[in-house]
Image (spheres, helix red, strand yellow):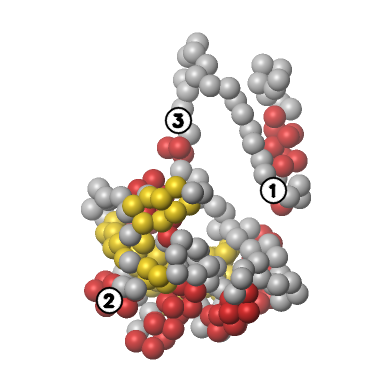
Amino acid sequence: MKILVIDNLAVASSRRYLYRELAKQIGEPVNLLVPESWREQGVVTHCEEENDKNLKVYPSPFIFGYRHQRIIYTKLKKIISDTCPDFIFISSEPENFNTFHLVATVKLFFPKIKIACATWRNIDYRHAPYPYKLGLINRLIEYFNRKRIDICFTHSRTAEALMKELASWDVVYIPPAINLDDFPYNPKNSTEIKQNFVVGYIGRLSHEKGVDILIRALSFCGESVIE
């Protein structure tokens, strides 16, 4: 099976570990479409080189700026033609412009290709406004997309329940991936403490966020950890 992945954040090599692992799992190279550059948290990252031969990266120009909900890749159709995928996964919410652009392009020119999107959503926008300036357009886009996307991957149980109510697509819950290389191992016999153990959290204090589990876990760490 030939797979094309579309991911704004994968301009950075460190954000591609999941797709390298996917290529290993399926035993075939994976194609990855990313923007030529991306700005996240005020930092602009230009598309970085890829050293893994099983992951081929295609940088594309885009329009409508550094906004996940509005970006559109101008080389999308060409890259689909060049890679001839059987399956396209776009790491994007169903109401986003690039998800609509993908769905419309595939249905018009490549109708045999299967499509999957992803969501972290925990708000039911059927009963609340979208938090975007062009929220009405996003609402119409989602209505269009949810009738034509084959699979929706959700990264929370709340999103899983919402997406099952929203459309007849297949909904698959996949917990967020964690790259263990981002957390280097400190040998137990090391006498040097390289940095303080700090936990920060910004978000809602709800059961789903797991803050209560974190606090309980910290209670077992002893006084040497908790100050």
| Amino acid type indicated by mark 3 | Pro
Viewer-side label of 2, 3: 2
Q: Which mark is residue 78?
A: 2
The secondary element bearing badge 2 is classed as helix
Earlier in the chain: of badge 2 and badge 3, it is: 2
Q: Nearer the viewer, residue 113 or 124?
A: 124
**x then y, percent, for residue 189:** 48, 13
Image coords of residue 50 (percent x, y): 27, 50
Q: Marks 2 and 1, Cα distance to the nearest angstrom?
A: 40 Å
What's the amino acid at mark 2? Lys
> For mark 3, what is the residue?
184
User: Which quarter of the rendering shows the C terminus?
Assistant: top right
**Label of residue 203 in the image:** 1
Q: For the residues carrying marks 3 and 1, which lies nearer the camera in this image?
A: 1
Rendered residue at 39%/82% (across/down)? 106
Judge from the rendering whether residue 56 lies leftward or rightward of residue 116; answer left or right: left
Q: Residue at x 71, y 26 (%)?
A: 220
Q: Secondary structure at mark 1?
A: loop
Which element type, helix, strand or loop, lies under badge 3? loop
Name the quadrant containing residue 161: bottom right
